[in-house]
Image (cartoon, helix red, strand yellow):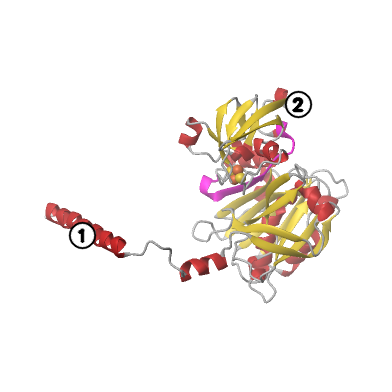
Amino acid sequence: MKIESFLKDVGGASRVTSARREKFRKGSPLPEPEDPIRALSDALHPDKMRFIVTDVRDVSPTSKTWRLRSTDGHIPIFQSGQYVCFHLQIGDSVLNRPYSISSAPFETKCDNPFIEVTIRRNRPYFVPDYFFDHVKVGEVLWGSMPFGTFYYEPLRDSKNVVAIAGGSGITPFLSMAREIAAGWLDVNLTIIYGSVHSSDIVCGRELDEIDRKCDKVKVVHVMSDDPDWQGEKGFVNREIIEKYSGEDTTYMFCGPYAMYTFVEKIMKEMGVPAGRFRKDAIAQPDVSLIPGYPSDKKDEVYTIKVMRGIHEDIIQAAASEPVAVAVERAGIALDTHCRGGECGMCRSQLLEGEIFVSPIGDGRRRMDKELGWFHACSAYPMSDLVIKIPIL
Ligand code: FES
């Protein structure tokens, strides 16, 4: 009986194959002049979008929020926690930079749809300062969106979410809080937000207002160095996390690497299952704080031979900066999206030399590791290198 049905399956498959072959034989070799599905998908998810800045406002002494509308009036659907990737030409460098969207998804569904990004000055590398100094109202920026998998998913995550944020890592949770407060997302969200001083809190006024008005959102500020602060003090620790956690909780973290290492340890101590702890770590400006980074190499400068097709360039690279930054500084285009080692857009090949790969942002597959592939955004040169990057 089983053999008979197996033979039927095989026979069926071969009939389908010959029918397909016949269709291919009769088909035109020319591309379909109109493909409505493709046209719809391109319209909903354009490869590149042209944004115009319509507002810039201060949200802390060191942070600003930029509001952007698309010049064609359409903004693709996204989820709180996803990011927009800007394509910037700064001097001779061509840079792609991801920024988590701090506005809420429902704000793309209104008559005048927009997104907002909130950026803090003095974050690593040179793009934040470019935004502060050059991106004014009326400026046009190119970008793509949405990207990233750091968002609430009801099929996977519990309805009680404790979000742990540090510094500008608050932005995905601000987006989520706005969405909940507007009634578009049914989640109980507690945000534990660590800052050094109350003057460092990003978007504090808006967060506190949502906390006051919406009983599904609670914001707990924790100050590590503010003697006058009346609320929680010190670093975000296990005691504070447990104090504000309920039953059946999903934990989400967004903040600097150093804080991530600490929070990950607490999650393990608390016995939180891996699937109930989601993270989005922000690149660490001080590389010596990345676990395992050989600090004695921090001040070294190496030479990298960069190969793309028939082109070869020799560039200088500091051991304290990711290979991707050195490549971009030299004016060589490299496609990047997440800048955190996860998406694989900057996947390159190491032909000679040694690199240090940040363990927090090592999204490589096992075979890639064995065959010498690496993600240039999360790898640091530890010697002179010869690398091959994708041709754009
Ligand atoms: S840009 Fe995503 S892995 Fe490098």
- Residue beneath disc 2: 299
Position of residue 352 relative to residue 14, above or below, is above
Which residues are drawn in magenta? 272-288
Q: Is residue 240 visible?
A: no
Q: Determine the residue located farthest toward the right in the rendered image.
A: 228
Amino acid residing under circle 2: Asp
Location of residue 195 in the rendering, given as x and y in whole percent from the top left corner: 78, 48
Position of residue 222 relative to residue 78, above or below, is above
Q: Is residue 388 left or right of residue 124?
A: left
Location of residue 225 in the rendering, given as x and y in whole percent from the top left corner: 83, 43
Location of residue 137 in the rendering, given as x and y in whole percent from the top left corner: 81, 64
- Residue beneath disc 1: 15
Split into quadrants, the picture shows ligand 1 in the one at top right
Location of residue 322 in the rendering, given as x and y in whole percent from the top left corner: 67, 36
Q: What separation in Å lies between label 1 and label 2 (alpha carbons)? A: 66 Å
Q: Secondary structure at mark 2?
A: loop
Amino acid residing under circle 1: Arg
N-terminal-most mark, 1 or 2:
1
Q: Secondary structure at mark 1?
A: helix
Confirm whether the magenta stretch covers residue 281: yes
Q: In the rendered image, which quarter is residue 213 located in?
A: bottom right
Confirm whether the magenta stretch covers residue 79: no
Q: Which corner quadrant holds the N terminus?
A: bottom left
